[in-house]
Amino acid sequence: MIRGPSGGGKTTFLNLIGTADIASKGSLRIMGSEITEKSSDKYLSQLRLEKIGFVFQTFNLLATMTAYENVELPMKLLGKLPNKQIKKRTLELLAKVGLQDRVEHLPSELSGGE
């Protein structure tokens, strides 16, 4: 858990380890690789796709895709699992967050707490 006062750098810290921002001072190593301003967008995108998960405070879901499709998409893009395993994993992940009965709902049909 990351806790601290308002303005204490929690969001900056998360943005750094999520590779959404680049450090202006110091250095950052993730999975053995230094992340710098020279790190390519392609490399950072692949790192996020394969190794880093996010849970956002606000919806960062594709509005025209169901909850199921939003969870399934990164696994499809990664292309490492067969479709049967992707389906199983997607349903498991939705169940873990209590959305097993909301798989066909669009983001606009989910409450902020969901």
Image (cartoon, rainbow, N blue to C red):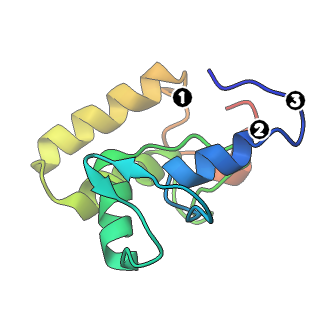
Residue neighbourhood size for the residue with mark 3, other residues' Cα within 10 Å, grouped as few (<14), some (14–19), many (≥20): few
**Quarter assignment of residue 2:** top right
User: What label does residue 5 carry, if any?
Assistant: 3
Secondary element at image label 3: loop
Lower sequence index among marks 2 and 1: 1
Q: Residue at horizontal 52%, vertical 27%?
A: 101
Residue neighbourhood size for the residue with mark 1, other residues' Cα within 10 Å, grouped as few (<14), some (14–19), many (≥20): some
Whether residue 78 sits left or right of residue 25 in the image: it is left
Which amino acid type is marked by label 2?
Gly
Q: Position of residue 51 (x, y in %)?
A: 31, 47
User: What label does residue 99 carry, if any?
Assistant: 1
Q: In this view, does 100 lie above or below 48?
A: above
Secondary element at image label 1: loop
Which amino acid type is marked by label 3?
Pro
Q: Is residue 103 above or below residue 63?
A: above
Q: Residue at horizontal 56%, vertical 53%?
A: 16
Q: Can residue 50 be seen in this view?
A: yes
Q: Position of residue 18 (x, y in %)?
A: 50, 51
How far apart are the two marked residues, 3 and 1, measured between alpha carbons?
32 Å
How many numbered discs?
A: 3
The residue that mark 2 highlights is 112
**Quarter assignment of residue 89:** top left
